[in-house]
C-alpha cells in the first residue's frame, strides 16, 4: 500500500484513512502557514479543516469543534440510553 503525500490537494477523507507521523503533520502545517503547536490530534483537526475549507483554524476554533463533537457524542449516548430504558407505569 502506498501512502499518499500530504498535500493541499489531498481530500480529508483520504487523509483520515492513513497514519501520518506527528513530524509529517508539523511539516505540512509549516508549509501551509498553519500553527504547528498542540498534540497530534490538534494538528490532525487543523489539517482536516484546512483540507475541507482552505481556511486556517485558530486555537479557539479547534476547541469549539472538539466541544461540538463531544456534545454530539454525548447526546447520541443519551438518546441510546433513553431508547433502551424500560418504561413502567
Image (cartoon, helix red, strand yellow):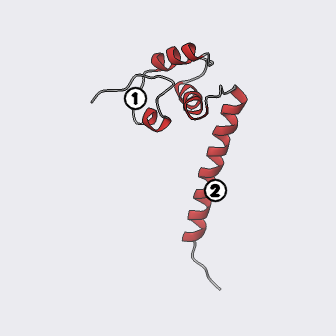
Choose mark 2 or mark 1, whichever is in front: 1
* Nearest the eye: 54 or 35: 54
Q: Is residue 22 above or below residue 66?
A: above
- Write the residue at 55% across / 27% down: 47
- Write the residue at 63% across / 38% down: 66
* Nearest the eye: 58 or 10: 10
- Write the residue at 59% across / 51% down: 73
Where's the N terminus, which quadrant?
top left
The residue that label 1 is drawn on is: 19
Q: Residues within 10 Å of mark 2 (few under 14, many from 20)?
A: few
For residue 19, side relative to residue 40 (left or right): left
Q: Residues within 10 Å of mark 1 (few under 14, many from 20)?
A: few
Rendering coords of residue 38 (x, y %) = 60, 22
Element class at badge 2 = helix
Quarter assignment of residue 39:
top right
Q: Is residue 22 above or below residue 60?
A: above
Q: Which mark is residue 64?
A: none
Rendering coords of residue 46 (x, y %) = 59, 28
Q: State yes or no: discs 2 and 1 in contact (Cβ < 8 Å).
A: no
- Write the residue at 72% across / 30% down: 60
* Nearest the eye: 35 or 89: 35
* Nearest the eye: 72 or 51: 51
- Which badge, 2 or 1, is on the more N-terminal residue? 1
Element class at badge 1 = loop
Quarter assignment of residue 5:
top left
The residue that label 2 is drawn on is: 75
Amino acid at each position: 500500500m502506498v501512502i499518499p503525500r500530504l498535500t493541499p490537494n489531498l481530500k480529508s477523507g483520504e487523509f483520515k484513512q492513513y497514519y501520518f507521523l506527528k513530524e509529517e503533520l508539523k511539516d505540512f502545517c509549516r508549509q501551509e502557514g498553519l500553527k504547528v503547536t498542540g498534540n497530534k490530534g490538534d494538528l490532525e483537526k487543523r489539517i482536516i479543516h484546512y483540507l475541507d475549507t482552505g481556511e486556517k483554524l485558530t486555537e479557539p476554533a479547534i476547541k469549539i469543534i472538539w466541544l461540538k463533537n463531544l456534545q454530539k457524542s454525548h447526546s447520541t449516548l443519551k438518546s441510546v440510553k433513553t431508547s433502551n430504558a424500560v418504561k413502567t407505569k
